[in-house]
Image (cartoon, rainbow, N blue to C red):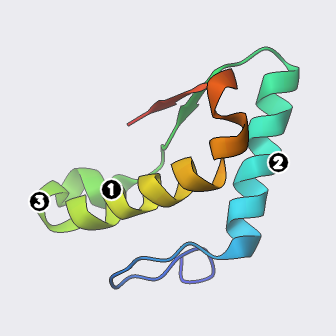
Amino acid sequence: MPERAQFTAPYTISSTFLNKIKSAVDDALKNKLHVINMHHHDSLYARPDELKPMFLAQWKQIASFLKPIQTAFYLKC
């Protein structure tokens, strides 16, 4: 997953991957889907206390990046 985000603080998500997320959100909204979920994060479920800072940092980045269209959907953590 290093091509998507850093594994150390501040856990920066790559601009390429943020744009991929934006594209997926745009497609979802076109199809009247309004809930965005972070899934396939098995390592988080296995080590929640250890990975909580990364999870929260990534959600903050995603929310900030998508802020211009934020009223059109819900983020589900």
Asked if 66 appears above or below 16 in the picture, the reply is above
Asked if 39 appears above or below 21 in the picture, the reply is above
Name the residue beneath numbered marker 3.
49
Closer to us: 6 or 70: 70
Q: Residues within 10 Å of mark 3 (few under 14, many from 20)?
A: few
Disc 1 + disc 2, Cβ < 8 Å: no
The kind of residue tagged 3 is Asp
Position of the N terminus by quadrant: bottom right
Judged by depth in the image, the label closer to the viewer, 3 or 1, is 1
Q: Please give the name of the residue rendered at 72% of the width and 35% of the height, measured from the top-left corner.
A: 69
Asked if 42 appears above or below 29 in the picture, the reply is below
Label 2: element kind: helix
Circle on res. 56: 1
Name the residue beneath numbered marker 2.
23
Side of 66 where 7 appears, left or right: left
- Which residue of the protein is positioned furthest toward the left in this rendering? 49
Q: Position of residue 16 (x, y in %)?
A: 76, 72
Label 3: element kind: helix
Closer to us: 73 or 39: 73
Disc on the earlier residue, 2 or 3 = 2
Side of 63 where 45 appears, left or right: left
Mark 2–mark 3 Cα distance, whole angstroms, equals: 31 Å
Position of the C terminus by quadrant: top left
Label 1: element kind: helix
Q: Please give the name of the residue rendered at 64% of the width and 76% of the height, measured from the top-left corner.
A: 14
Q: Please give the name of the residue rendered at 22% of the width and 59% of the height, measured from the top-left corner.
A: 52
Circle on res. 36: none
